[in-house]
Amino acid sequence: MAPQAQAPRGQQPGPGPQAAQGLRPERLQYRFDGPDDAPVLVIGPSLGTTWHMWDRQIPELSQHWRIFRYDLPGHGGAPAYPAAAVSDLADRVLATLDSVGVQRFGYAGCSIGGAVGADLALRHPHRVAALALVAASPRFGTADEFRQRGVIVRSNGLEPIARTSPERWFTPGFAAAQPAIVEWAVQMVRTTDPGCYIASCEALAAFDIRTELPRIGVPTLVLVGAEDKVTGPAEARTLVAGIPDARLALVPGASHLAPVEQPAAVTDLLLMHFSTAWQDTQASIPVPPSPGFSAPFAPVVPVAEISAAAALPDVSSDALSGLYDRGTKVRREVLGDAHVDAATAASDGFTDDYQDLLTRYAWGEIWGREGLDRRARSCVALTAVVASGHLGGLARHVRAALRNGLTPVEIKEVLLQTAVYCGIPAAGAAFEIAQSVIQEETTPPA
């Protein structure tokens, strides 16, 4: 049984799974709850979930706002139009809101939904009245972690991710006490489109707004479960320290999906934040106020700690420019942070110039060109390494090929082709190396 509350009166769903089949790729599946004439509050989901993760907040929130919920592409029966960048998802949110005449709104989002809200506040500040970032981060782990997750899904489907989702999303005590909700969570992941899930992993891998946080100019609540091991209190404090007008809400007894695990505390915190944050911007919201929204709320007592942040951590970095900057970015995306960090650490005065040449020329100029996509370049690279006999570099190119979207079956086909044109001995040695790497990279964590 899903953790849902009974739908409030006056709810107006957007396209359901069947009607959504006719949606344009640039728009999202959505629904409305609450009065037609109330200010709009947009609520975004976490990766692998649907809009139902917010069901327990809707009865109270929809008394004061017109709640707009959306599904990520390929989630909850939504059309499977992958979006490989957070900015792409944000653009689709705006396009969907534009299609229903919503101009200015409050925004609350969980995890990748929070990333979308931060992107909207950065690129479209005139549209966002107030912001709540739930279980969010200015950078979600490392790019390697999310690209590795994409490799696992591409090779094994979503079942390994579904099985391990409860331990990422909930505290152990909640998971043991609420097996029905745990099963509901697992089923949400299982029914997600794998290609859209992989694209969302790529979006999170590339997301990094650490140096842009001071430009978020709207009142912001940063809400985090005290026991969140995915995007925990440390990440939340970085957000609060970097955003000029932000406050921290630490929710006890909650992990990553705090709205599901501690619904009352999260609802109270959102009510307090948006009722307060919107007082100064109310006149600029082009929606007639409802009778129930004309006066401030009575104070609520959240089951959480709200505090200002500690001092801003040092998140500045030396800016690289031109081809070296582009080459570094592409090299990390293709080979992974671990490999690039190791190569950089091993470099010295004798090899620094070579590393610079490699980054600018191989990765900035060649791998950075638009003539071939990265899948095609991986096919060429695998073939060239086998043909040249430089098998010492084959393992990292097999890993790169998996990260670039080639499946183990496609890598096998490339190596079979090399057997014809490069010789059986070379291909045989390549198969041994590739087999070991593929087993290592595609085996789900225990």
Image: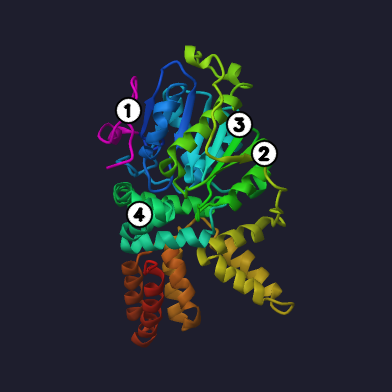
Residue bearing mark 3: 125
Cα distance in 3D space between marks 2 and 4 = 42 Å
Q: Earlier in the sequence, mark 4 or mark 1?
A: 1
Q: Earlier in the sequence, mark 2 or mark 1?
A: 1
Cα distance in 3D space between marks 4 and 1 = 27 Å
Circle 2 residues within 10 Å: few <14, some 14–19, many ≥20: some
Circle 4 residues within 10 Å: few <14, some 14–19, many ≥20: few
Cα distance in 3D space between marks 3 and 2 = 9 Å
Q: Earlier in the sequence, mark 3 or mark 1?
A: 1
Residue bearing mark 2: 215
The question of residue 101 being in magenta is answered with no
Find numbered disc 2 in the image and state the secondary structure of the residue it sits on: helix
Q: Earlier in the sequence, mark 3 or mark 2?
A: 3
Cα distance in 3D space between marks 3 and 4 = 42 Å
Cα distance in 3D space between marks 2 and 1 = 37 Å
Mark in the foreground, 3 or 1: 1
Residues shaded magenta = 1-23
